Amino acid sequence: MMKNKLLFAVTLFFFTTIHAQKFENLALTPPMGWNSWNTFQTNISEDLVKQTADAMIASGMKDAGYEYIVLDDGWMTMERDSAGNLVPDPKKFPHGMKALIDYVHSKGFKFGLYNCAGTKTCAGYPGTRGYEYQDARFYANLGIDYLKFDWCSSDGLNAKESYTTMSKALKKAGRPIVFSLCEWGQNKPWEWAENVGQLWRTTGDITAKFDGYLDHGTWKQTGVMPIADLQKGLRKYAGPGHWNDPDMLEVGNGMSENEDRAHFSLWCMLAAPLIAGNDVRKMSEATKNILTNKEVIAIDQDKEGIEGFIYKIQDSVEIYVKPLSDNNWAICFLNRSGEPKNINFNWQDEIINDTLFNRTLDAKKVNYKLRDLWKKSNIGDTKKPLKASIQSHDVLMLKAYEK
Ligand code: GLA
């Protein structure tokens, strides 16, 4: 008996230590925020951050749930100081990083920074390799809440080991910090990062292009559609506190309004982190309306945290479905083709099965009410077929709900 109790205690100890590796209870829904990279690259400054925070409040983004303001690559000087500490660039941040973080916090946001597991960041600034514990203490002392951790200059490193080391260093430093792994999906982080961080990139860098790639010779950026395609098979790895990250949003960065709406809808169907990457100080009404549609955001932020999937493809219209809490569903008809498409979807003939999460939408058994989440209007129920026309590169996004 005594032996059994001892065995139980030892097993419990091991379990809690393994699972205690990362901070628990962070990012229970996909993180939302803004990141400087997609629009500003390394042209960042304290004015930009302050103006962005203010604009996120004025535009309703904060109210819609955008929480983290993250500075990507380019916030440091080219060298560490004589004690080996990272140095925020005094030209870009003349009042110091701490004062800026205090400002962002005082406006009700959380704050994030970027670094890299390798010896240098992708833009050539000092990387963290060999300084993990020191940098983690530096971040905790500054009071950051989010760390994006990249994978440049990482030759010879083992991804799982490198990211685990940084995760442990953050834990040791003691301040809860969301840990965002950015190794571009090269080492299948979905298979090993559940207890290392809260989100992991699944692909290379996104670009504001609906389909295809942007080729730079030695590397290429991936458009919205191929990124969405690359999420296939990954949904079983996502859930509260551990998300697949198909990269930051390109809404407002040059695609058409239809394409931006389709991109945003898909990211919500995929339970993706919603990290805006546009200049929120100067966005159009259309961009603002897309980024702040609370009913669409609620699909992304549903507390069950189930990533959606393609139920079927009909005449170039991809039908994404996502089980939600309270037995509700989101359904998104995506017209990938270059011309408008008419859809005729008879709910009575379809049984939508999510075998992975054990959920079924069967309109013969339950009559669901339907709401068009972009038009913000109720459009009947699943007793009669859905007939609609969808513009090229656009979506019809619905919520089906019992009550
Ligand atoms: C990599 C990342 C990007 C961005 C840049 C910064 O390419 O994938 O998201 O952080 O580095 O240099």
Image: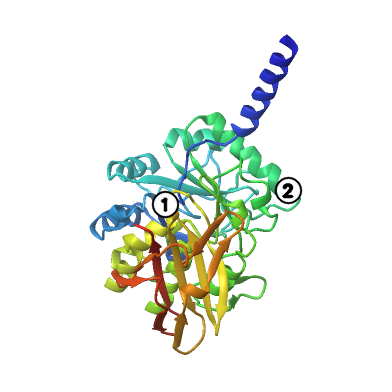
Image check: 153 left or right of 302?
Answer: right
Q: Residue at x 50, y 76 (%)?
A: 209
**Mark 2 surroundings: few (<14), some (14-19) or many (≥20) residues within 10 A:** few
Q: Residue 192: where, in percent of width, then height?
A: 67, 46
Dot 2: element: loop
Q: Tag 2 or tag 1, which sits nearer the N-term? A: 2
Q: Residue at x 45, y 83 (%)?
A: 343
Ligand 1 sits in quadrant = bottom right
The answer to which quarter of the image holds residue 225 is bottom right
Disc 2: which residue: 157
Q: Nearer the viewer, residue 310 or 90?
A: 310
Hey, what amino acid is under mark 1? Answer: Asp
Q: Is residue 105 visible?
A: yes
Which numbered disc, 1 or 2, marks the residue closer to the eye?
Answer: 1
Image check: 121 left or right of 334?
Answer: right
Disc 1: which residue: 326
Find out if the beta carbon at label 2 lies less than 8 Å from the nearest ligand 1 atom.
no
Quadrant occupied by the C terminus: bottom left
Image check: 20 left or right of 90?
Answer: right
Is mark 1 in CB contact (under 8 Å) with mark 2?
no
The answer to which quarter of the image holds residue 36 is bottom left
Q: Is residue 82 visible?
A: no
Q: Nearer the viewer, residue 199 or 278?
A: 199
